[in-house]
Image: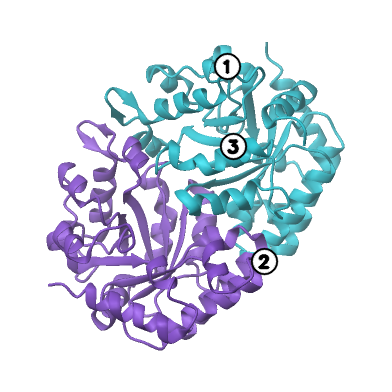
Chain colours: A cyan, B purple
Amino acid sequence: MSQSFGARLAESMVQHGPLCLGIDPHTELLQAWGLTNDPAGLATFSKTIVEAAAETTGVAALKPQVALYERFGSAGFSVLEETLELARQANIVTIADAKRGDIGSTMAGYAQAWLADGSSLAADAVTLSAYLGYESLRPAIDLALANNRGVFVLALTSNPEGATVQHAAENGKSVAKRIVDAASQDNAGVGQLGSVGLVVGATVTGAAKALNIDLARANAPILAPGYGSQGAQAAEIREGFGPAWGNVLVNSSRAILRQGPQIPALHAAIEHSRKDLDVK
Amino acid sequence: MSQSFGARLAESMVQHGPLCLGIDPHTELLQAWGLTNDPAGLATFSKTIVEAAAETTGVAALKPQVALYERFGSAGFSVLEETLELARQANIVTIADAKRGDIGSTMAGYAQAWLADGSSLAADAVTLSAYLGYESLRPAIDLALANNRGVFVLALTSNPEGATVQHAAENGKSVAKRIVDAASQDNAGVGQLGSVGLVVGATVTGAAKALNIDLARANAPILAPGYGSQGAQAAEIREGFGPAWGNVLVNSSRAILRQGPQIPALHAAIEHSRKDLDVK
């Protein structure tokens, strides 16, 4: 890959719009698709979604949920590897939603898994979690940038208990703001969209403002879960993110996947979301 | 398993002392042992360590470092599964050092992987990371307790950047203290040692006191990395943890593993640490 992750993602978003399709092989979804809740069912489910995304316009990125493969151990990881390979062949941007985080050479191990050229699990980007501090993620950030890959660091999430960590402050600066500011620094001076992304819930843009967080200045791709079923509406999300909206990748999983397993029905659901999100 | 994780761990510590041996298949260690840096090397390395632990007194628990298996994708996870199975057969307590953390049904997926009966990756306990808040870990805590397994939640770590998150406070209460207090609640009323453990660096007991954290009251097994090479000395750790010392599982990895690959040399290193940690 000769372009940075940020540049590739930005191009994909110009072509497809802001929709990120989550590949979430929940037990209930597998059942609803008439599939077995095992690695074989996982494989059919994942392959169908990659095919559906490849054959249409509207999916800027695919985001496999690693936990739901990991529950089947190495056999589940095997399916995840096949899924990432199919997406690679179809030239679709992938974000492995793994929320990894550690320090030093252990963090480097996770970076190797998800961000190294030639790794069977290599994705275009991986999500990271920084209970150990933003700088503890450095081995992954460095490897991502060296390999034209990216990361998305959890910043501000919508689950009610998230605030107990993310709103906590030191010297008047919240944990979430500290992370956004650190990502801003890593993305500074990049002419186009940076490659150090952030995860910010679609429904917590008000909290972001209250914490004095400037998302637009971060020059970061922003992965926003919480759109659609039980979540926020497109116009609210657009308004909430304000000037950062152009960098927002809106995730949807179940609202679309529930329409499967037939590919035309998945296409219709993707098209519906694409149009819905096309708010200026 | 008919006993709680806390009870089994406490028994193991009575028999073996407080040493937890980390299985850290770093590239440099594999090379030092004359092994290839691939799944085959990983398998020999892991098997040797489980055998060494099984044939001696002094190892209360084994802690495989998941990232260092994950870097080889599904093939690495396959080796981790074999390693956990060998430890199970040898009746050694295992702690999968995975530092997982997510919310809702995704967190339940991780719980399923590491804490469900019959899962190929099932360990006696798993380490968790709570950037999303302690309560977000509930599906794993619940499954652990239901299955007589355990968790170790990252509380206070020794890496310099850890403080930016862990010392941050809300209403005068630090993130780390909030986590310790929540674990205390989950361990309350358990006659013996609780099954909701904490990770607290061996060198940050001073910071714990400064943050008004009462580790003894938590009734929690405490996993303490940072002993030995470049870390804290046994007497310092004993003194630092004070009345909580009886619940502390002291991790050592490289200082012992560097003495391999010969099992007698590993035994000598384990025995040396066991004696060193036998401070009253």
Q: Quadrant of residue B79?
A: bottom right
Q: Amino acid at mark 3?
A: Val
Judged left or right of residue A69, residue A105 is: left
Res. B75 mark: 2
Q: CA distance from mark 2 to mark 3?
A: 24 Å
Q: Could you tell me if residue B183 is visible in this image?
A: yes
The image shows residue B50, relative to residue B137, as above or below, that is: below
Mark 3 sits on what residue? A151
Judged left or right of residue B98, residue A169 is: left
Q: Quadrant of residue A176?
A: top left
Q: Secondary structure at mark 1?
A: helix
Mark 1 sits on what residue? A244
For the residues labelled 2 and 3, say whether their Cβ atoms are less than 8 Å apart: no
Chain of residue at mark 2: B
- How far from the left and from the top, in percent, is residue B88? 47, 80
Residue appearing at x 29%, y 70% in the figure: B6
Chain of residue at mark 3: A
Q: In the image, are marks 2 and 3 on the same chain?
A: no
Q: Does label 1 or label 3 sit earlier along the sequence?
A: 3
Q: Nearer the viewer, residue B37 or A124?
A: B37
Callout 2 environment at 10 Å: few (<14), some (14 to 19), or many (20+)?
A: many
Q: Nearer the viewer, residue B246 or B278?
A: B278
The image shows residue A205, relative to residue B103, as above or below, that is: above
Which quarter of the image is occupied by the C terminus of chain B? bottom left
